[in-house]
Image (cartoon, grey):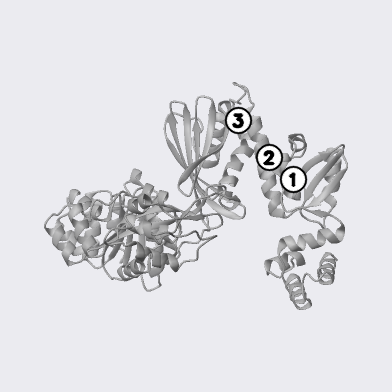
């Protein structure tokens, strides 16, 4: 009955064609699904358009946005969050004795009758998209919980653990913690920091590598918040003097999210860091990582070799593991036996055997790598070479016909060679096995919606080392001209260059940036470099020789992306150090 009515309305109003409607009806019957859901899922009609047409037909006002700040707290208190979520509705205003309610399913009015009974007031209904209502529900109840937690007086916190465990989903602390996860996923945050201060509990999200203060709660709720997280992570809530590590798996907006939990005691109380890993996130392919065509061709050539060692270097959080995963994805095939030993296993790769190190029981990178050699592997990935033993086994694996991928913590590509020597690895072994070293950093990408073009000053050009002998501005300008510029183009002046600056808009949450990309320095170990290694040259000398042979250092690769409008000069300068070699 409902499907025939929806089809008749959409057809009469010209929102769908007869052919599309007929096919959608067949699919709906076959799948036992609602016609409107099938029409949206098959892109026959946009959800907002469908809702607008049905709302107009039935005489309801349609709103595309809900002004969360204007929703009265008094209404929120009277409607349980579970009721609002299950029925996809939210009271958003009150005029005299009438409550204005936004709801999503224009074909099911029974929840409005239940809400009238719950509030004891007449209701005026308006229609809004389901995702808009869902976001508004979370934000409105989060604000309500923040007010409850912020307004609490010292000593109001519940101390009894049993009471905390028995809390229902309506408890403000539980709802507040749940909203931390929801908002983190919605904001694309990689980490949640919960930090106690003298007066507050401060929450910060790491988004695109930068920490942003998001919210606070009264310090009196610190123990309840920490205990709630510990309960979910399976940690000991009575132990507050020692660090603890745990794990939570949550389903948020239809996505499975793996949360790594770390707690440490501080002078002001326990501090928690939650790292979010989207289990269903698609792994990036090599071309998506920001390599220029020449470097990409080199990388693809290197990972196709049957043996040798390829190292990726950079500080923590510079995307080394993502690069290694992309390399493994590229070469993964049924003909190859690929094995990894990691700490921890961040994403599961189909067709690849992955091992999680456990130092407490003696399963280290070295012992895992040693055991791998008895499993007839073709390609081995080692999460990190931390000591001489691991380095020696990796070299032995390479010498016996295996391709080894791993990481080191050094500032540049040449530094990886001196680091191996410092570990006690003989230079002749390095020259016999090392194929290449890739140094990398992550920089934030400018929001393409609001980025603003401008003519750079000569100081900016000089700081990025664009006007050096190896990188004339004209080279970068030609690359820039091949890209699509955003917005009005100013007079380019004498430099022939356009840079872009961050502005901030709704699409990027006012930051001016959205997403991150890599900048790279690829050192190929060829004969001249081998000669320098055998002669125990320092990293500066190795870099100098490599630059003479075409090595593009990190800042130069970053400058390329600045001119292409991908990132800003500030991002590149913050992520790299000035080149000391000409």
What residue is rendered at 54% in x and 38% in y?
Answer: 229
- Check the picture and name the quadrant holding the C terminus: bottom left
Which is more N-terminal, label 2 or label 3?
2
Residue bearing the label numbered 2: 141
**Marks 1 & 2, CB-CB < 8 Å contact:** yes
Q: CA–CA distance between discs 1 and 3?
A: 28 Å
Residue 342 is at least partly visible in this image: no
- Left or right of 544 in this view: 214: right
Q: Secondary structure at mark 1?
A: helix
Query: CB under 8 Å between callouts 3 and 2?
Result: no
Is 567 placed left or right of 532 in the picture? right
- Tell me residue 385's x, y (percent): 28, 52
Element on which disc 3 rests: helix
Asked if residue 440 shows in the view, the reply is yes
Q: Which mark is residue 84?
A: 1
Q: Which mark is residue 162?
A: 3
Indicate which disc residue 559 carries. none
Label 1: few (<14), some (14–19) or many (≥20) C-alpha neighbours in 10 Å: many
* 1 or 2: tag closer to the N-terminus: 1
Foreground residue among 240 and 89: 89
Secondary structure state at the residue bearing disc 2: helix
């Amino acid at each position: 009955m409902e499907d025939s009515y929806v089809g008749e309305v959409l057809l009469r109003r010209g929102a769908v064609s007869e052919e599309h409607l007929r096919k959608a009806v067949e699919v709906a019957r076959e799948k036992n699904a609602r016609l409107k859901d099938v029409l949206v899922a098959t892109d026959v009609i946009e959800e907002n358009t469908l809702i607008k047409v049905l709302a107009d037909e039935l005489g309801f006002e349609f709103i595309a946005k809900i002004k969360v700040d204007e929703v009265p707290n008094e209404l929120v208190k009277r409607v349980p969050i579970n009721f609002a979520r299950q029925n996809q509705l939210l009271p958003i205003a009150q005029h005299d004795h009438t409550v204005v309610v936004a709801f999503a399913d224009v074909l099911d009015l029974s929840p409005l009758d239940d809400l009238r009974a719950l509030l004891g007031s007449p209701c005026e209904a308006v229609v809004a998209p389901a995702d808009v209502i869902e976001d508004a529900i979370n934000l409105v109840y989060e604000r309500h919980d923040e007010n409850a937690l912020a307004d609490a007086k010292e000593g109001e916190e519940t101390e009894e653990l049993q009471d905390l465990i028995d809390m229902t989903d309506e408890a403000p602390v539980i709802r507040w913690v749940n909203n931390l996860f929801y908002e983190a996923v919605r904001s694309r945050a990689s980490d949640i920091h919960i930090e106690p201060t003298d007066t507050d509990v401060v929450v910060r999200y790491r988004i695109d590598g930068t920490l942003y203060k998001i919210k606070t709660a009264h310090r009196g709720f610190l123990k309840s918040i920490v205990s709630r997280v510990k309960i979910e992570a399976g940690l000991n809530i009575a132990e507050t003097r020692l660090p603890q590590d745990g794990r939570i798996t949550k389903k948020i907006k239809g996505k499975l999210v793996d949360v790594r939990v770390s707690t440490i005691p501080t002078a002001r109380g326990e501090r928690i860091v939650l790292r979010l890993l989207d289990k269903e996130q698609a792994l990036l392919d090599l071309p998506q990582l920001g390599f220029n065509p020449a470097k990409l061709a080199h990388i693809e050539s290197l990972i196709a070799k049957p043996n040798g060692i390829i190292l990726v270097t950079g500080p923590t959080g510079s995307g080394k593991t993502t690069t290694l995963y992309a390399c493994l994805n590229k070469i993964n095939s049924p003909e190859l036996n690929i094995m990894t030993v990691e700490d921890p296993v961040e994403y599961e790769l189909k067709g690849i055997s992955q091992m999680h190190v456990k130092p407490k029981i003696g399963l280290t990178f070295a012992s895992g790598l040693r055991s791998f050699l008895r499993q007839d592997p073709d390609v081995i990935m080692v999460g990190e070479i931390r000591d001489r033993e691991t380095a020696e086994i990796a070299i032995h694996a390479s010498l016996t016909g295996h391709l080894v991928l791993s990481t080191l913590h050094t500032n540049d590509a040449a530094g990886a060679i001196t680091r191996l020597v410092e570990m006690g690895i003989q230079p002749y072994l390095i020259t016999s096995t090392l194929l290449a070293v890739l140094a990398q950093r992550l920089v934030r990408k400018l929001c393409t919606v609001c980025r603003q073009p401008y003519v750079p000053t000569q100081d900016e050009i000089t700081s990025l080392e664009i006007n050096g002998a190896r990188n004339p501005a004209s080279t970068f300008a030609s690359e820039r001209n091949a890209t699509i510029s955003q917005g009005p183009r100013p007079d380019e002046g004498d430099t022939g260059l356009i840079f872009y600056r961050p502005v901030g808009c709704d699409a990027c949450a006012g930051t001016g940036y959205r997403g991150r990309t890599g900048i790279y320095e690829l050192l190929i170990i060829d004969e001249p470099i081998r000669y320098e290694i055998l002669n125990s040259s320092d990293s500066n000398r190795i870099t100098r020789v490599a630059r003479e042979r075409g090595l593009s250092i990190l800042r130069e690769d970053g400058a390329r992306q600045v001119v292409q409008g991908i990132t800003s000069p500030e991002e590149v300068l913050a992520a790299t150090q000035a080149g000391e070699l000409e």
